[in-house]
Image (cartoon, grey):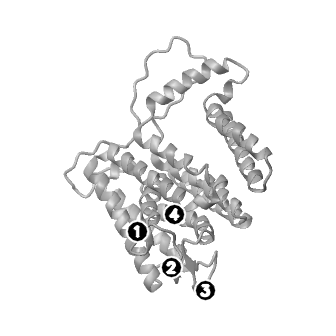
Amino acid sequence: MIRLALAFAALGLAFLGALLVLRGLPLGWGLIALGLPLTPVLALAGDALTGDFVGTLRQRAGVVLGQMRPWMWLTVLYAALHIPVPLWPQGFAPLALLSTGALFLAALAYVWEGVGARRALVMAALAFGVGLGVELLGSRTGFPFGVYSYATAPAPTLLGVPLLVPLGWFALTLSAALLSGGRAWLAGLLLAAWDVGLEPLMTAEGYWRWSDPAPLWAGAPVQNFLGWWAVGAGLSWAFTGLAPGLFGRRGRGWDWPMQVRGEARVRVTVGPILRESAPRPDLSRLTFAVAYPIEAFFLPGGLVLVGRYREAAVTLAAMLGALALARAVRGKR
């Protein structure tokens, strides 16, 4: 774990640099220039600082590049599009749309690779349609989330709903369903924890406005989080029914006669390496569940950048707590 610890330290250095730049301190640019390139380097070879660092870095970089799948590259793009936000606050809306779109495509590519094109397209369309439908219903009637409005939402919108909202429902529900092992109740809880951070950030950026008579958190009532749990659990249940093998479940998936390829994990054969000075990276166990912990890093970070320190701390605690619960529940199998 030393590699991950050092990589996160380097990323934190870059984040500190962004905060300094926002306060007009030129030193921040130096920290960004140092921290950003160091992050992937230390993630690959941070445990070889006292050994053959360059050789280990080259070896592991080659192995990782050989194992990368399309959905992984799209996930990297999604994460990379978060980086300019602190340096270009006015670009939050286009960057948020581009990053969410990249995450949507990553989720689609992951499912496509795992269970084929038709199920992937059906799952994406289902989540997009349900996400758009509940947001239209909610913003017009107050059910199931409470009283709110998209009147101040930046473009582009679809029927008055910001486009990134239904795109996000598919990607984050898939990640939560994978983390929960197809347990609908747990996936819904993971999504509700994610919304703990989403509410203060997106209201600060003007995507929606709450006017509910019983606010609990960032203007949102308890009903909002119950609604998130219910919609997330319902979508997760549908995903598991459509493609149980993707979530480690047995069965054909509602008897739909389509080819099931098993879990969308990397299957690679690495050629012989004459000298292995350190353990080689193995991406074969990596799944799209990784999107959730990535959000657990960037979402509190975004709240810090807009000055919502208390909300950032609560969001981090909520998402890490949900991740710990998911790990504990899955560990009981």
Nearer to us of marks 1 and 2 is 2
Which residue is label 4 attached to? 191
Within 10 Å of disc 1 (Cα), the crowding (few <14, some 14-19, many 20+) is many
Nearer to us of marks 3 and 2 is 2
Residue at x 40%, y 61% (from the top left corner) = 236
Within 10 Å of disc 4 (Cα), the crowding (few <14, some 14-19, many 20+) is many
Inspect the image, locate mark 3, and give the three-letter code of the amino acid beneath it. Ala
Which residue is label 2 attached to? 151
Inspect the image, locate mark 2, and give the three-letter code of the amino acid beneath it. Ala
Picture layout, residue 8 above or below residue 317: above
Inspect the image, locate mark 4, and give the three-letter code of the amino acid beneath it. Leu
Looking at marks 3 and 4 on the same chain, the residue that comes earlier in the sequence is marked by 4
Q: Position of residue 2 (x, y in %)?
A: 68, 34
Q: At numbered mark 1, what does the secondary structure look like: helix, strand or loop?
A: helix
Nearer to us of marks 3 and 1 is 1
3D distance between C-alphas at marks 3 and 4: 21 Å
Picture layout, residue 228 above or below residue 116: below
Which residue is label 3 attached to? 214
Q: Which image quadrant is residue 272 in?
A: top left
Q: Position of residue 24 (x, y in %)?
A: 78, 54
Looking at marks 4 and 2 on the same chain, the residue that comes earlier in the sequence is marked by 2
3D distance between C-alphas at marks 1 and 2: 18 Å
3D distance between C-alphas at marks 3 and 2: 20 Å
